[in-house]
Image (tube, helix red, strand yellow):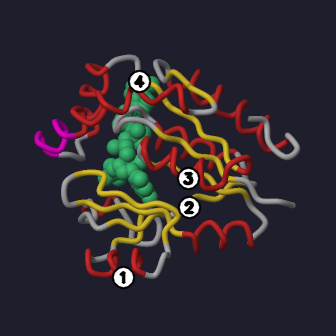
Amino acid sequence: MQGKIIIFSAPSGAGKTTIVKHLLNINPQLSFSISACTRDKRGRSEENGKDYYFITPEDFKKKIGNDEFVEWEEVYEGAFYGTLKSEIERIWKSGKHVILDVDVKGGLSIKNFYKERALAVFVKPPSIEELANRLTARNTDSDSSISSRIFKAKFEMGFEDQFDRVILNDNLEKACAEAEKLVNQFLSAEPAIV
Ligand SMILES: Nc1ncnc2c1ncn2[C@@H]1O[C@H](COP(=O)(O)OP(=O)(O)OP(=O)(O)O)[C@@H](O)[C@H]1O
Ligand SMILES: Nc1nc2c(ncn2[C@@H]2O[C@H](COP(=O)(O)O)[C@@H](O)[C@H]2O)c(=O)[nH]1
């Protein structure tokens, strides 16, 4: 079996993590690629090696120097995130397909790297106002972090046309059902649907 990679990208708060968690719960063929990041762990709600590999900026720089990332970015000021080549290889060696959620620029870089082995899905929020509401209700970010996420979201919304597929997440149940369908089609296609 040739391993494939499914990328969910969106502005922060659009719901990509929620949709990816749903897919992981229902599809045992999929395994989550854990990114490296330099931001602080969010208390007890996150676990090192499960949500992210939380590493220091110095270690992150070393990994850049050693060419260990498929892509990496300073997603928010002072916070670096990167997709590790070793994660993708680990998952493919285990006989599963990779699924991950990254920001919009990162998603396009991964698609460009893996080409037809990858499906890039843009999760579209109903509006910028709804994004702000969701981030506020999620209660994981400070007001200034929410402001910078919204600022970036306005720019990222212009990239949906560059993705293979777009899912509007105005209703979570509907969006999850659509995501399930896209993923099943992609995984059953030879070599890829795009
Ligand atoms: N259709 C929806 N309607 C209302 N709330 C939603 C919907 N989809 C997701 N949410 C909620 O919105 C919040 C943001 O979702 P989520 O964390 O999945 O976004 P994200 O795109 O992964 O953001 P980030 O990039 O910051 O990780 C969560 O609290 C989630 O439960
Ligand atoms: N370009 C990349 N973006 C990534 C990666 N891992 C996560 N992310 C995205 O960063 C933001 C912030 O996430 P948060 O956990 O601090 O809320 C979010 O959009 C993630 O999807 C990565 O490896 N590369």
Q: Amino acid at mark 2?
A: Ser
**Does label 4 or label 1 sit earlier along the sequence?**
1
Measure how far apart labels 4 and 1 are at the Cα level. 36 Å
Q: Which mark is residue 33?
A: 2
Residue receiving disc 4: 125
**Looking at the image, which is closer to me, 66 or 9?**
66
- Comparing marks 3 and 4, which lies closer to the viewer? 3
Could you say whether the residue bearing mark 1 is in a helix, strand or loop? helix
- Labels 3 and 1 touching (C-beta < 8 A): no
Q: Earlier in the sequence, mark 2 or mark 3?
A: 2
Mark earlier in primary sequence (1, 2): 2
Residue drawn at the location 23% of the way across and 41% of the way down: 139
Which segment is the magenta one? Answer: 142-148
Who's the residue at 11% across and 39% down the image? 143
C-alpha gap between disc 4 and disc 2: 23 Å
Which of the 4 quarters of the picture holds residue 73?
Answer: bottom left
Q: Decide: few, some or many residues near mark 2? Use Cα within 10 Å; few <14, some 14-19, many ≥20.
A: many
Residue type at the position of mark 3:
Ile
Mark linked to residue 92: none
Q: Quadrant of residue 113?
A: bottom right
| Residue at position x 65%, y 57% in the image | 98
Q: Nearer the viewer, mark 1 or mark 2?
A: 1
Q: Which residue is mark 3?
A: 110
Work out whether 157 lies above or below 85.
above
Is residue 90 highlighted in magenta? no
Figure quarter occupied by ligand 1? top left
Quadrant assignment for the N terminus: bottom right
**Mark 3 neighbour class, 10 Å CA radius: few under 14, some 14 to 19, many 20 or more:** many
Residue 179 x/y as whole percent: 64, 32
Q: Earlier in the sequence, mark 3 or mark 1?
A: 1
